[in-house]
């Protein structure tokens, strides 16, 4: 597919996977003054990292680079580099990746010991992604019942309504045959509005939250703060949690306060809400925009979706596998010696799992892993992670994607891609700047 081979990349963008801002900071900032006053390693002081740590994030169009894909077959547990005194391993094989992600005993995701006093005291480092049991177990047990398939059933009408509203906006923008950018008209608003309703944010506060979300999604103006810096959205949600302790809302924040208010403090609950926000906004928006671009180049599949003759479920699963927009799983810090793929990793090492490389391992897919092929059959992809830290909002994401792709195709069967999408180059979430489309031949 020409789009997959030739999508342009915009190096100015730097996305953020939920809980992975530290890696973005590493890629942007570097390695100067790494010791805290206590003499321990403090990654918050990092200033610059070598290309040897950044290159696995780069893609060839929308698919992982040939160099990265080759590691899955030749060296699936690869000694990537030594960085600030730590051996860094890159895992690219599918089986090896699943083994690492499933092993909560040998690895920790708690980064707080490595970020100095700021990361331990200000509450910005943590949440589900950077929390080990028993805290992780307690927090996830609170959140999971709110995001089961049964619980999400009540959100289906909302998702359908949001999608229809944004399809109307696309239609208005396309009136007269002009070009339309699917990112601001469709891909960003759909998950944003769904998240606002899920969290129970009052209408009067959503415009403020939209501004924070837009800045977080488009970081070309300078990126995120360093370790210890609390984002604007986290502060917003902390304020909202405090407000809802007094005036509970109808959404997730209010329900968690009603059920667990005595067992969770404001910062913990704001962290859970912020995880829903970061995990459900950029990833879903990127999937909606880039997935639409892939589908628009595959006219038989697009026509089948438009006619209702092609089931949307396998299409969504193949797009999740193909794009794997979250590029690196939460880093695993080795706490006891383990063997993965025949390689021994030791305490003090860091293991990075490349989700796109794992999902393009031909031991999983068979030949042609870089092709979009919804007929290849179900694959145990890792787009949502695996094990203890598997994305808790996976089913909500699937609901949004299925509803949005089917709705877009049904409304605009003649939609065409104007140019390959513009995507990020070194991005933890495969970010997208714009996807230009036009109705008609």
Image (cartoon, rainbow, N blue to C red):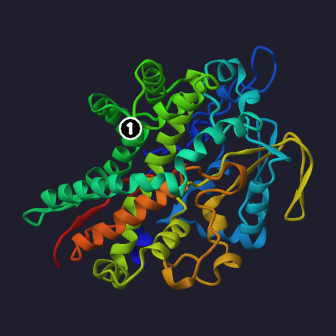
From the image, which quarter does the N terminus lie in?
Answer: bottom left
**Along the horizontal axis of the image, is 413 left or right of 79?**
left
Instruction: In this rendered view, identify the residue nearer to me: 255 or 106.
Output: 255
Total marks placed: 1
Q: Residue furthest top?
A: 37
The image shows residue 128, relative to residue 158, as above or below, that is above
Q: Position of residue 171 (x, y in %)?
A: 16, 61
Residue at 72 percent of width and 29 percent of height: 112
Q: Position of residue 124 (x, y in %)?
A: 59, 26
The reply to whether residue 67 is in sight is no
Give SS at disc 1: helix
Image position of 60 (left or right of 435): right
Residue 354 horizontal side relative to residue 179, left or right: right
Tell me where residue 154 appears, x and y as whole percent: 41, 52
Q: Classify 1 as above or below 258.
A: below
Res 186 seen here: yes
Q: Give the residue displayed 19% in from the left and 55% down from the top.
A: 169
Nearest the camera: 293 or 33? 293
Q: Nearer the viewer, residue 202 or 215?
A: 202
Classify residue 408 by image quadrant. Answer: bottom left
- Quarter occupied by the C terminus: bottom left
């Amino acid at each position: 597919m020409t789009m997959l081979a030739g999508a342009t990349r915009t190096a100015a963008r730097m996305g953020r996977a939920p809980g992975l801002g530290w890696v973005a900071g590493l890629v942007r900032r570097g390695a100067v003054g790494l010791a805290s006053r206590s003499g321990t390693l403090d990654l918050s002081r990092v200033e610059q990292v070598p290309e040897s740590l950044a290159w696995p994030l780069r893609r060839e169009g929308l698919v992982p680079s040939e160099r990265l894909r080759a590691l899955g077959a030749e060296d699936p547990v690869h000694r990537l580099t030594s960085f600030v005194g730590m051996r860094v391993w890159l895992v690219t094989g599918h089986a090896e990746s699943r083994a690492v992600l499933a092993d909560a005993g040998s690895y920790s995701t708690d980064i707080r010991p490595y970020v100095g006093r700021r990361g331990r005291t200000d509450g910005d480092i943590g949440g589900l992604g950077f929390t080990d049991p028993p805290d992780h177990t307690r927090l996830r047990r609170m959140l999971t019942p709110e995001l089961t398939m049964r619980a999400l059933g009540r959100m289906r009408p909302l998702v359908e309504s949001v999608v229809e509203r944004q399809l109307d906006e696309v239609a208005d923008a396309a009136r007269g045959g002009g070009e339309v950018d699917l990112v601001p008209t469709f891909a960003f608003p759909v998950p944003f509005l769904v998240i606002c309703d899920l969290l129970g944010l009052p209408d009067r506060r959503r415009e403020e939250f939209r501004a924070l979300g837009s800045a977080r999604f488009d970081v070309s103006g300078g990126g995120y703060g360093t370790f210890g810096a609390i984002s604007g959205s986290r502060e917003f949600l902390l304020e909202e949690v405090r407000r809802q302790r007094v005036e509970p809302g109808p959404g997730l924040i209010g329900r968690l306060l009603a059920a667990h208010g005595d067992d969770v403090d404001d910062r913990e609950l704001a962290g859970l809400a912020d995880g829903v926000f970061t995990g459900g906004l950029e990833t879903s928006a990127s999937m909606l925009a880039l997935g639409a671009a892939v589908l628009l180049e595959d006219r038989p599949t697009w026509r089948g979706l438009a006619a209702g003759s092609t089931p949307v479920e396998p299409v969504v699963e193949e797009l999740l596998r193909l794009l794997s927009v979250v590029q690196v799983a939460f880093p695993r810090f080795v706490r006891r010696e383990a063997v993965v793929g025949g390689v021994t990793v030791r305490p003090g090492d860091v293991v990075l799992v490349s989700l796109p490389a794992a999902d393009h391992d031909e031991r999983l897919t068979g030949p042609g892993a870089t092709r979009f092929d919804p007929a290849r059959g179900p694959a145990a992809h890792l787009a949502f992670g695996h094990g203890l830290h598997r994305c808790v909002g996976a089913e909500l994401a699937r609901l949004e994607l299925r509803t949005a792709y089917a709705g877009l195709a049904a409304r605009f069967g003649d939609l065409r891609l104007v140019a390959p999408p513009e995507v990020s180059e070194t991005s933890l979430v495969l970010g997208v700047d714009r996807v230009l489309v036009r109705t008609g031949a």
